[in-house]
Image (cartoon, rainbow, N blue to C red):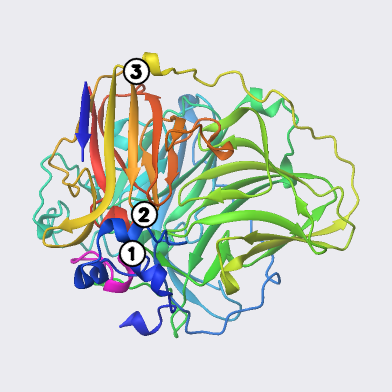
């Protein structure tokens, strides 16, 4: 069976005609000029989105130390369940030196605190919402029961919210969700964590307002560990570093600049016309610091990399001061360890993707520097961060030839059906939007129904860049454009980066839990403007 589903513009960075015609700047230009989709795609824009320019002086790169997010401690560990508490609240931080920036935060920090857990040991996280708008929390990559997955209309309402329905169901946008679950002030999220060890991340997932909420600071890391991974001898302790990369732009008052139609994020969703394809910032932050530097030993380091940007894509390389590239030895993907290591010199990274990478600094002279460069950036966005090798040290870590034996082995012949989904620009309620199978998201509509335990092959087709994310399950990449997967497609993933005009095939088994889940583009502006669909597992 096959189913087809078919102004701040003055601060916007000047774009070439090629970028604009490639939908990099504004879908409205396509409508106004009559530019066809095929004509737009023939130009293959290097980026999807438009860049804001900061209105404050920016610091030179590689001077601010790399922060390491604090690890959150449980408030109790009774009955085999670790219980955490997180307050969502407004705070300010010195992101740029000498400048205070207001933020929306988890526990007052940006990024939020890291949760570290053990495979198979469940946790409960109580979130308290002291922000001025409703929120929803999604553990990205988690094998999570539906009632804790952070569905976009399952909201925590702040105490100041006028009533239990205003804006909660998306009613002001012509949509209503009779299945929405609303709680006042607090909500408990339960995560069984019966899944492979990996690095996940948690972030806001409120319908229509995910992008500005993440931009304002609502994101944090969650690492799952187990005994088998601990025994491999990989770099650990201070030589295991979380690297959460995000771009932002800063307004003249030091606040985070974002082109919301409604800056209060209370009523009307969306962004101003030039930014419909995605919002890009001109400042690259790592763990909340601009272009940071980190002092390292002449040894191996494990970098657990997340692209936490709304729309920006990266192509990372590690380059010494004398121009030599260091190998990026990939040991893991979104959903945990690979079977065997894969060595890269360039590593593409789409929004929401994670890569687990080993970098060996032992061959770098003491006192010299290694820059992490974004090959897709230009000007200030070409630099990401730097490492300064400051001392010799012993190193008993290793990279085993076999990393994991528990990856699923799905085959096309296992699939009970093949489905096809297009991810394209279109009209949503009479305005510009982003559609899956020609339809904008509607929480009241059932888009795809699968049976628990079924294996399916999905063919995904894109017009411009679309990082496609499936909730609940991991998947394997079978093909891109009818050809074998690329080297960085190895392992078990939950987000795949579709390039302009590209198709890809993935395979997965829908196991774990029954209920209502999502799949969507993780360009957060696309997601807010309709590029989500419902997935019912029965």
Residue sitting nearer the eye, 89 or 454: 454
When the figure is inspected, residue 418 is found, relative to residue 286, above or below; the finding is above
Left or right: 106 as drawn, with respect to 184: right
Q: CA distance from mark 2 to mark 1?
A: 8 Å
Q: Secondary structure at mark 2?
A: loop
Residue 83 in view in this figure = yes
Give the residue number, with chain letter if any, for mark 3: 415
Q: Earlier in the sequence, mark 3 or mark 1?
A: 1
Relative to residue 412, is residue 94 depicted above or below?
Answer: below
Whichever of labels 3 and 2 marks the residue nearer the N terminus, that label is 3
How far, Cα to Cα, is label 3 from label 1?
Answer: 35 Å
Residue 501's x, y, as percent?
Answer: 37, 49
Badge 2 vs badge 1, beta-carbon distance below 8 Å: yes
Q: Nearer the viewer, mark 3 or mark 2?
A: 2
**Mark 3 neighbour class, 10 Å CA radius: few under 14, some 14 to 19, many 20 or more:** some
**Is residue 340 part of the magenta span, yes or no?**
no
What kind of secondary structure does the magenta stretch mostly adopt? loop
Question: What residue is shown with label 1?
Answer: 23
Q: Is residue 503 left or right of residue 490?
A: left
**Which x, y percent locates residue 355?**
58, 43
Tell me: residue 50, above or below residue 516. below
Residue under label 2, please give it. Answer: 464
Give above or below for 477 relative to 281. Answer: above
Residue stretch in magenta: 264-277
Q: Is residue 59 left or right of residue 446?
A: right
Of the 4 image quadrants, the one containing the C terminus is top left
Mark 2: few, some, or many residues within 10 Å (few <14, many ≥20)? many
Q: Earlier in the sequence, mark 2 or mark 1?
A: 1
Q: CA distance from mark 3 to mark 2?
A: 28 Å
């Amino acid at each position: 069976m096959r189913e087809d589903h078919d102004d701040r513009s003055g601060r916007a960075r000047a774009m070439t005609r090629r970028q604009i015609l490639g939908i990099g700047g504004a879908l409205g230009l396509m409508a106004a000029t009559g530019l066809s989709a095929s004509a737009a795609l023939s130009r293959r824009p290097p980026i999807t989105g438009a860049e804001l320019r900061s209105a404050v002086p920016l610091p030179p790169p590689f001077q601010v130390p790399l922060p390491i997010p604090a690890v959150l401690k449980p408030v109790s560990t009774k009955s085999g369940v670790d219980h955490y508490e997180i307050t969502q609240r407004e705070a300010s931080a010195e992101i740029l030196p000498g400048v205070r920036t207001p933020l929306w935060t988890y526990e007052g920090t940006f990024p939020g605190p890291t949760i570290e857990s053990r495979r198979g040991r469940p946790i409960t996280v109580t979130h308290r919402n002291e922000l001025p708008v409703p929120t929803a929390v999604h553990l990205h990559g988690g094998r999570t029961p539906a009632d804790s997955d952070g569905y976009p209309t399952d909201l925590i309402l702040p105490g100041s919210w006028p009533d239990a329905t205003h804006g909660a169901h998306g009613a002001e946008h012509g949509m209503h969700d009779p299945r929405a679950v609303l709680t006042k002030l607090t909500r408990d999220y339960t995560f069984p964590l019966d899944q492979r060890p990996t690095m996940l991340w948690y972030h806001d997932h409120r319908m229509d307002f995910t992008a500005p909420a993440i931009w304002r600071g609502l994101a944090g890391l969650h690492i799952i560990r187990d005994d088998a991974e601990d025994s491999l001898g990989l770099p650990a302790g201070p030589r295991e570093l979380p690297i959460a990369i995000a771009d932002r732009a800063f307004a003249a008052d030091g606040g985070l600049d974002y082109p919301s139609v409604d800056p209060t994020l209370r009523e009307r969703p969306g962004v101003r016309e030039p930014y419909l394809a995605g919002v890009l910032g001109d400042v690259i932050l790592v763990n909340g610091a601009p272009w940071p530097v980190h002092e390292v030993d002449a040894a191996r380091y494990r970098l657990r990399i997340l692209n936490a940007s709304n729309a920006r894509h990266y192509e990372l390389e590690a380059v010494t001061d004398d121009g030599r590239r260091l190998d990026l030895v990939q040991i893991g993907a979104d959903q945990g360890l690979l079977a065997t290591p894969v060595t890269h010199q360039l590593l593409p990274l789409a929004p929401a993707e994670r890569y687990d990478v080993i970098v060996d600094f032992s061959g770098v002279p003491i006192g010299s520097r290694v820059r992490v460069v974004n090959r897709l950036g230009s000007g200030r966005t070409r630099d990401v961060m730097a490492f300064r090798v400051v001392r010799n040290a012993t190193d008993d870590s290793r990279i085993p030839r076999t990393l994991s034996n528990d990856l699923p082995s799905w085959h096309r012949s296992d699939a009970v059906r093949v489905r096809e989904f297009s991810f394209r620009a279109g009209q949503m309620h009479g305005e510009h939007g982003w559609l899956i199978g020609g339809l904008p998201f509607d929480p009241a509509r059932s888009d795809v129904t699968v049976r628990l335990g079924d294996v399916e092959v999905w063919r995904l087709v894109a017009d411009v860049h679309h990082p496609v994310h499936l909730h609940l399950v991991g998947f394997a990449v079978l093909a891109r454009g009818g050809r074998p997967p690329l080297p960085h497609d190895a392992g078990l993933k939950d987000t795949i980066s579709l390039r302009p005009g590209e198709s890809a095939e993935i395979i997965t088994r829908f196991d774990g839990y029954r209920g209502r889940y999502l799949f969507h583009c993780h360009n957060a502006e696309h997601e807010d403007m309709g590029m989500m669909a419902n997935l019912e597992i029965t």
